Image (cartoon, coloured by chain):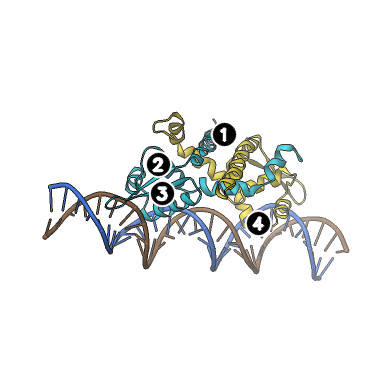
Chain colours: A yellow, B cyan, C brown, D blue
Amino acid sequence: MPVNNKEHHACKKSLSAVRDALDVVSSKWKLQIIIAIWAGNKRFKDIQRQIGSISPRMLSKELKELEEHKLIVRQVYDTLPVSIEYSATPHAETLQDLVDNLQNWGIKHRKVVLGK
Amino acid sequence: MPVNNKEHHACKKSLSAVRDALDVVSSKWKLQIIIAIWAGNKRFKDIQRQIGSISPRMLSKELKELEEHKLIVRQVYDTLPVSIEYSATPHAETLQDLVDNLQNWGIKHRKVVLGK
DNA sequence: TTAGTTGGTATACTTTAGTATATCGGTAAC
DNA sequence: GTTACCGATATACTAAAGTATACCAACTAA
């Protein structure tokens, strides 16, 4: 990689944007939760059962953060008792490409490290 | 995002590859170190000075891990005293696209969260 | 002779992420 | 009336990541 290369410059210019992306994508549970919701699980307990190993504390915390990040929405239905449904936003769908890229690089990387 | 969607399936199929990529990319220092090396810094102290805030302990640890990941190589020169040079491998260059994607998603994401 | 550079290591600490487990008020089914 | 489900919260803990600071032997330049 040459010095002052255009791509190098593009890479260096903003690691804070990279950090923003990683805040979402690098946590142990956030992607798994979104995937569980994409798979049709809307309720707290459904998501918890789908993932299997997440504690209610973490699920609660991560759901709140995902909502703050506008990746999911929490809807309260006026039933008795109230029921609550989580759904993924269109913004969450934009994660798909990023996750694919991470995955593909991960596969390539493993081949390089393990000597193909 | 519909259930049983092809893209959804592709996303779910291997979160472990995503984890492999994140092992490299989500640490506080690894990318910064590679960027410092790309910028022409080859020696331990040069890299440390370039980054500015990294402790020698972390730099040492991260350099070792980057070498294990085959992203950099450590060369020992038979001078007096011995001098050591780090350089990035071609494999490290493949990170460029991934980092660009993370960065672009991060920028998009910030716009969404802050309401454009 | 003394101060500084090099490529680190050692020890101890804090901070962040994640785990484990018990509990809650309300409701519904048996 | 008791047991279980729902959507969580509370408290306490462990583990992983990162920080702070001092130090080292070998060498060099003033």
The residue carrying pointer 4 sits among few (fewer than 14), some (14 to 19) or many (20 or more) residues within 10 Å by Cα, namely: some
Q: Amino acid at mark 4?
A: Ile
Q: Chain of mark 4?
A: A
> Gap in Å between the C-alphas at discs 2 and 4?
39 Å
Q: For the residue marked with disc 2, what is the amino acid?
A: Ile
Share a chain, discs 2 and 3? yes
Can you tell which mark lies on residue B74?
Answer: 3
| Subunit under mark 2 | B
**Secondary element at image label 2:** helix
Which is nearer the N-term, disc 2 or disc 3?
2
Residue sticking out furthest to the top: A6
Residue at mark 4: A54
In-front residue for pair A71/D3: A71
Badge 3 crowding class, 10 Å Cα cut-off, few under 14, some 14 to 19, many 20 or more, is some
User: Which amino acid does the dot numbered 3 rest on?
Assistant: Arg
Residue B57, relative to residue A68: is it above or below?
below
Asked if labels 2 and 4 share a chain, the reply is: no
Q: Chain of mark 3?
A: B
Is A81 positioned to the left or the right of D28 in the image? Answer: right
* Direction from residue D4 to residue A4 in the image, left or right: left
